[in-house]
Amino acid sequence: MAICKPTLIIHGGAGNIRRDKLPPDLYEKHRASLQSYLRSTYALLNDGATALDAAVHAVSLLEDDELFNCGRGSVFTSAGTIEMEASVMVASVQPLDDNRPGELKKAAAVMNVRNVRHPIQLARESLLRTGCSPDGTPRADGGSMHPQLAGPHVENLARDWGLEFKPDEWFWTQKRWDEHRRGLEGKDEPISLSQGTVGCVCLDQWGNLAVATSTGGKTNKLPGRIGDTPTLGAGFWAEAWDMFLPGGLLVDKCAVSPHAYTQTTLSTQNVGCWDLWGSPFRHMLPRWFAHGPKTRDNDPPAYLPRSAHCVTGPDLKSVLDMECSEFEPRRDRKAIALSGTGDGDTFLRIAAAHSVASLSRFQNLSLAQAVQSIAGLGGALQRSAGSRWGVTGEGEGGIIGIEVSTAKAILPSSSSSSTMGVSNWGQKAEMGPLYRGNVVFDFNCGGMWRAWIEPGPLGEDIERVMVFHEEYNSASG
Ligand SMILES: NC(=O)C[C@H](N)C(=O)O
């Protein structure tokens, strides 16, 4: 049964893109490409495609488009060769199910790939071919449980799996060759450069999230260099976790401060604690919490389901007797997926995508806040460049993502003007509640090519295509 409204965001690279160095015709070409890929991918999602297939569809189109640094438009290494990288990863707000495509392996990445027309399709095949069944018995699909595969070995698998190959000439483009030559000669770029990696994050009707990312890497990278795009947790990540919402009991530390958050790992699962005092669930708290937080030194140090570990106190028995029938523990699930672009060496150094996920999960930040603190201005990517910031391109980049939760509501997104957030209140539809993904992005450099669908004031779909923080034609930015 459909439980989610499809949600979609695509990026086409971030970097030192400047308004005065981005001619209108080049802007228009990027805008038209991104809009067309956004539309066809969104149509697929609405027709019932899985998030994985839709994301791979979007990135396959980008890989054939010379404008972007991936597939056919890939940049050259310092040796004048093309070495491509791509990755996919999935997560779901549905309960874990090893029979769901991709769930067994969760992520697959390919690196140092040559002549494969669609590296992203190779990553998809590698994800789905695990070489074993959910119960661990061998399966003859030619795959393995390895999430990262490189070079001639994975190219051989691509042949075995029937993927399309193209000759070197097909990948050669004048624009990238000129960039390569100018770079070797130490000359400046005459027009705006984006680092050009592409990515798609989407949510399907069944609550599955997928991220697909593809790149040629950095212009004049050393042959054999592996970047963030095919490295788990650096240039991409997807994750889902269970949350407990009102009906469970609160962590002591959480009760001390209205904004505190505590996460305790229990034997079989992680449980989280929301800031209930400032949350929309306030009115659902039992009456004995009505006076707000206070410290209870003898309480158990974790937020646990009632049956396992209960709040102590004089009124506990009567509270449970009176309140529990109307206050059942409810387990909700949250999922996120992220794709990055920019200086991959920095993304690697700070495990950028996984850092965003950890902030969201363990610090209980909205995804918008978490993305901002890593990829926004003054965020961890920028800070890690130190005194080299603005000189070498180090630390520059951006991240796109989607979060979705089966709770009736999630915490509102950051109000920062540079971090786009769409609130995620469950929508009522005939078949029951539909959840909407929350599209987020941020970047710390001149621009990031991106396109997404957002809800208008009446809930209608609105397409957005942007490169700067503001519209291309606005005076500022
Ligand atoms: N184009 C990019 O975004 C570059 C990519 N992140 C890399 O460093 O390999």
Image: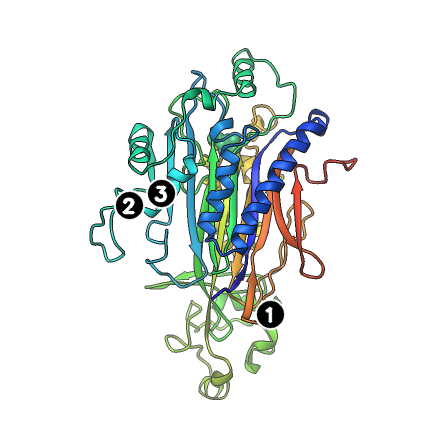
Which residue is at a point 61% across and 64% down the rendered structure image? 425
Q: Residues within 10 Å of mark 3 (few under 14, many from 20)?
A: many
Residue sitting at 49 percent across and 31 percent down?
70
Q: Residue under circle 3?
A: 125
Q: Earlier in the sequence, mark 2 or mark 3?
A: 3
Q: Residue furthest right?
A: 475
Towards the viewer: 118 or 386: 118
The answer to whether residue 354 is above or below residue 251 is above
Three-letter residue code for mark 2 = Met
Q: Nearer the viewer, mark 2 or mark 3?
A: 3
Image spot of residue 82 (x, y percent) = 43, 23
Q: Which sits in the foreground, 6 or 259?
A: 6
What residue do we see at 42% from left, 71% from top?
Answer: 304
> How far is the residue under mark 3 from the one under mark 1?
36 Å
On-image quarter of the C terminus: top right
Image check: 228 left or right of 12?
A: left
Residue 393, located in which quarter of the rendered image?
Answer: top right
Mark 2 surroundings: few (<14), some (14-19) or many (≥20) residues within 10 A: some
Q: Is residue 438 above or below residue 284?
A: above
Q: Is residue 267 above or below residue 386?
A: below
Residue position for label 2: 145
For badge 3, the amino acid type reads Glu
- How far is disc 2 from disc 3 in space, using C-alphas? 12 Å
Q: Label 2 vs label 1: CA separation? A: 40 Å
Q: Position of residue 222 (x, y in %)?
A: 42, 21
Q: Earlier in the sequence, mark 2 or mark 1?
A: 2
Callout 3: CB less than 8 Å from ligand 1 = no
411 or 456, nearer to the observer: 456
Q: Position of residue 432 (x, y in %)?
A: 54, 71
Q: Which mark is residue 428?
A: 1
Which of pointers 2 and 1 indicates the residue nearer the eye? 1
